[in-house]
Image (cartoon, grey):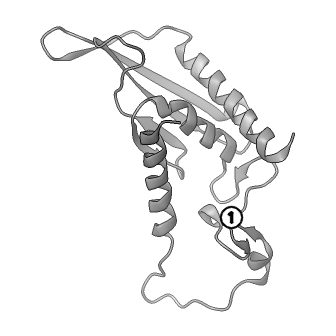
């Protein structure tokens, strides 16, 4: 992962974590739920839990319904392009236009949709857009090779499995 992609991912993650740190006005906070405080968190029992829940055995973030391994693998794989947006609630990661390779007259943009809790191909869809320079400083849409999206999906699935094996040993 490049330094720029790592910095972008870190900033997005920080914003997500910090956005959940306040209590809305008029809401009273009672004693902690004994069931919730017994779940493991980042800093021990009852500690920080990303997105408010622990991951289950399939890698799904329970409150979101998206597979955490597919999500992280999508971010890793698409990190060669500048990140435009990442919506963990909707399961969409969109890149901005960027160049892959050395051709200055071509640029691509990709969107990955992570759906469902299972680590399988049905839980992932990638859409790729391509543009070529018109020679006048503008860009025009161009066709994308038929297997490009499928090859990206395969790369994401492979990376997701690698992450799962690193974390769980299986």
Q: Quadrant of the rendered structure where residue 72 is?
A: top right
Residue extending furthest toward the front:
3
Q: Is 30 drawn above or below residue 67 in the view shown?
A: below
For residue 45, above or below residue 66 = below
Q: Residue at x 60, y 62 (%)?
A: 51
Residue 25 placement, left or right of 74: left
* Residue furthest left in the image: 136
Quadrant that contains the C terminus: top right
Q: Is residue 80 above or below residue 67?
A: above
Residue 138 percent across, percent down from the top left: 17, 17
Q: Residue at x 71, y 45 (%)?
A: 117
Judge by depth and name the residue closer to the eye, 163 or 19.
Answer: 163
Q: In the rendered view, does 148 fall on the left or right side of 120?
A: left
Residue farthest to the right, as pictured? 170
Left or right of 104? Residue 64 is: right
Q: Position of residue 115 (x, y in %)?
A: 62, 40
What residue is shown at x 45% (from left), y 41% (from top)? 3
Residue labelled with disc 1: 53
Question: Which of the 4 image quadrants contains residue 106?
Answer: top left
Q: Residue at horizontal 58%, vertical 29%?
A: 125
Question: Is the residue marked by circle 1 packed among few (<14), some (14-19), or many (20+) residues within 10 Å?
Answer: some
Nearer to us in this view, 41 or 93:
41
How many circles with numbers are drawn on the protein?
1
Secondary structure found at label 1: loop
Q: Residue 50, image x and y in percent? A: 62, 62
* x and y, in percent, of residue 29 in the image: 58, 89
């Amino acid at each position: 992962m490049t330094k720029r992609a790592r910095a972008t991912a870190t900033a997005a993650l920080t914003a997500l974590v910090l956005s959940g740190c306040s209590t809305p006005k008029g809401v009273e906070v009672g004693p902690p739920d004994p069931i919730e405080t017994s779940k493991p968190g980042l800093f021990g029992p009852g500690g920080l839990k990303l997105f408010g829940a622990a991951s289950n055995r399939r890698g799904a973030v329970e409150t979101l319904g998206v597979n955490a391994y597919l999500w992280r693998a999508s971010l890793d794989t698409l990190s060669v392009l500048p990140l435009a947006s990442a919506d963990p609630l909707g399961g969409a990661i969109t890149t901005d236009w960027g160049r892959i390779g050395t051709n200055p007259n071509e640029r691509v943009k990709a969107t990955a949709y992570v759906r469902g809790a299972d680590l399988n191909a049905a839980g992932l869809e990638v859409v790729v857009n391509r543009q070529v320079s018109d020679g006048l400083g503008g860009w025009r849409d161009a066709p994308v090779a038929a297997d490009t999206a499928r090859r990206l999906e395969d790369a994401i699935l492979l990376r997701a499995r690698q992450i799962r094996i690193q974390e769980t040993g299986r």
